Image (cartoon, rainbow, N blue to C red):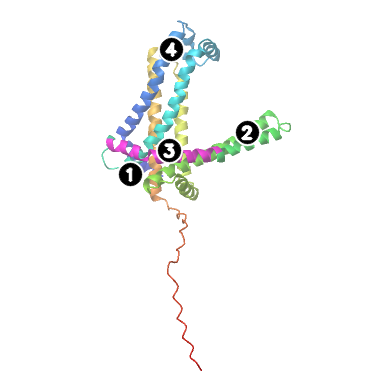
Amino acid sequence: MNALRTSLQQTRRSFRLLWLIYGITLVMGLLVAFPFYNTLKVEDQNSLAFMNLLKGFDYTIYSDFMHRSERTISPLMSVGRWLGSLYVFLSLFFAGGILLRFSQPYNLFSSGLFWQGCAHYVGRFLRLFGVTMLFVVIGAGLWLVIGSLVSVAVNDSFTERGLFWIGAGFFALFALTATLFLCIGDYAKVIMFREDEHNAFRAFGQAGRLVLKNLTRTYGLYWLTILVGTGLFGIYFLLDDLILMSNWPTILIMFVIQQTLIFARVALKVWWLGTAHTSYETLPKPLPTPRPSPLAVQTTEPEPEPPLSPRLPD
């Protein structure tokens, strides 16, 4: 918990960093929002049915609109997917600058130094992302495969409720395993940053041993931040049900709440990476895996044998 408090204080002192990342996230959202809004204005044909969506989602209105305008909306959906991939890349890109910021907590924030840190570590973190996703797909995805096989095998022996709980149990195992690997991946970023490690597999292995030996102080804190983020989403959906967007003031209020939630998510991600950096400095480090060294080759020449003495005649 000391790591949480320390990193929270450092996050509060890094408001310029938070606003920078939030501003970039906002611009990325507007790149899709404005074209999407203009397309909707053209495609709605002055229909008042869309006003009903302000009071809640109506699948009938949505399906009718997509059936009529799917060809026009599909390119915008594709742009949204590409922006999602760009968002993942930017989260890896920003990690180096964030860790550099937490390594200098008492210095004033410098945007130039932040960008230098981002550019310096992005190559390593991209390789680490590939390693992390490999473990998530194979290690965590294995639970989904086993769950599907078990559900097929016992399909005739259980009711729908029983099959649901079997599927929920295997999905819970998948979620726990996937989040464990993601937590290890974040600590591997810290190791690559602090120890100047270039090998992604070696950093992931060292981080794995560190996390497994200190589950409560690493994976436990990771789940705590997940629960905080889930709580923020729960508050948002509660406010969304209470505030009906029936006029411009209520729409403006919900817009402010949405942007506050986005800013809080940015702060939560920065806070967690800072927590991993701070806790790494206090946790006992596992012994590094010994690397085999090449055998020394003997280069000395054997001593020459003494010359044979001539045989004297009798």
Closer to the N terminus: mark 1 or mark 3? 1
Labels 2, 3: front one: 3
Q: What main secondary structure does the magenta stretch of the protein show?
A: helix
Disc 2 marks a residue whose amino acid type is Gly
- Quick one: 219 or 305, which is closer to the camera? 305
| Residue 147 quadrant | top right
Closer to the N terminus: mark 2 or mark 3? 3
Cα separation between marks 4 and 1: 46 Å
Q: Residues within 10 Å of mark 4 (few under 14, many from 20)?
A: some
Closer to the N terminus: mark 4 or mark 1? 4
Which residue in the structure is indicated by mark 1?
103
Labels 4, 1: front one: 4
Which residue in the structure is indicated by mark 3?
126
Residue 80 position within the rendered picture, expressed as x and y whole percent measured from the top left: 45, 22
Disc 4 marks a residue whose amino acid type is Thr
Q: Which mark is residue 182?
A: none
Question: Magenta stretch: residue 220 in it?
Answer: no
Rendered view: 3 above or below 78: below
Labels 1, 3: front one: 3
Q: Residues within 10 Å of mark 1 (few under 14, many from 20)?
A: some
| Rendered residue at 49%/8% (across/down) | 49
Cα separation between marks 2 and 3: 33 Å
Disc 1 marks a residue whose amino acid type is Ser
Mark 1 vs 3: CB contact within 8 A: no
Cα separation between marks 2 and 4: 40 Å
Report helix, strand or loop for mark 4. Answer: helix
Which residue in the structure is indicated by mark 4?
39
Disc 3 marks a residue whose amino acid type is Leu
